[in-house]
Amino acid sequence: MKSTSRMLNRQVAQMSGLVEDLLDAARLSRDVVEIKKMHVDVKQVFSQSVEQARPLLTEKGHELNIRVPEKSLFVTGDHQRLVQVVTNLLINSAKYTEPGGHILLKLQAAGSDVVITVADNGIGMPPALIARAFRLFTQGQPTAARSQGGLGVGLALVKRLVELHGGQVRATSDGAGMGTEVVISLPGIRTGADGRLFS
């Protein structure tokens, strides 16, 4: 009975995710995605994103390594949308990494930017896929590692939301079976008395 209930819960969550993907795809196509700008502590974004992605990470048996600075880093943006960005990347890594894989979530300052990195040791991407990874409805090849459904909306939405925050996103991979790294750069807010990004 419990196993049936868990299966139904997973299916309901998957269908809800697909509906949200379709709604986001519609918003992207009409260019009506909006953000509410305020000062955002990216460490708090990480905490909420990990909480949302944790069920899939646990189900897949992945090890998540989180690296953040001792002090907070701030950007101007929409907290919930940034949570959506990081969560999408974590879930994407979980889907495309064989069970028991390793995923890195890192936050750091680089010059005037706040840099978010999500890297995994998953199936990787060939150069042709890297070139179109952030286009709407682009998907990698289905594998045993990717048992969750999807419409290829996640990375396209990530790119658009990052751009709306004045940032940039790029993906790199050394090829099939070599994992993938996605790096986001966002303009940081200098909050320290000495002009540093750290508060």
Image (cartoon, rainbow, N blue to C red):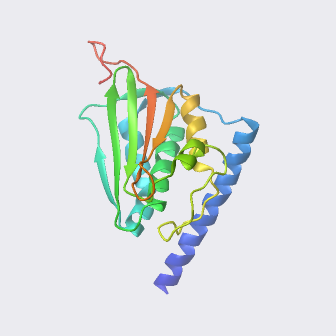
What residue is shown at x 45% (from left), y 55% (from top)?
93
Task: Look at the image and tell me in which quarter the C terminus lies.
Answer: top left
The residue furthest right is 30
Image coordinates for residue 161, horizontal then vertical, percent: 57, 36
What residue is shown at x 51% (from left), y 30% (from top)?
168
The residue furthest top is 194
Q: Can residue 116 be seen here?
A: yes
The residue furthest bottom is 1
31 relative position to 42: left or right:
right
Image coordinates for residue 54, horizontal then vertical, percent: 40, 59
What residue is shown at x 33% (from left), y 41% (from top)?
106
Q: Can residue 36 be seen here?
A: no
Q: Nearer the viewer, residue 82 or 127?
A: 127
Q: Nearer the viewer, residue 98 or 49?
A: 98
40 relative position to 154: left or right:
left
Image coordinates for residue 8, horizontal then vertical, percent: 57, 76
Quadrant hosting residue 37:
top right
Q: Is residue 57 above or below residue 109?
A: below
Quadrant hosting residue 13:
bottom right
Q: Is residue 103 above or below residue 8?
A: above
22 relative position to 145: left or right:
right
Image coordinates for residue 58, horizontal then vertical, percent: 38, 65
102 relative position to 156: left or right:
left
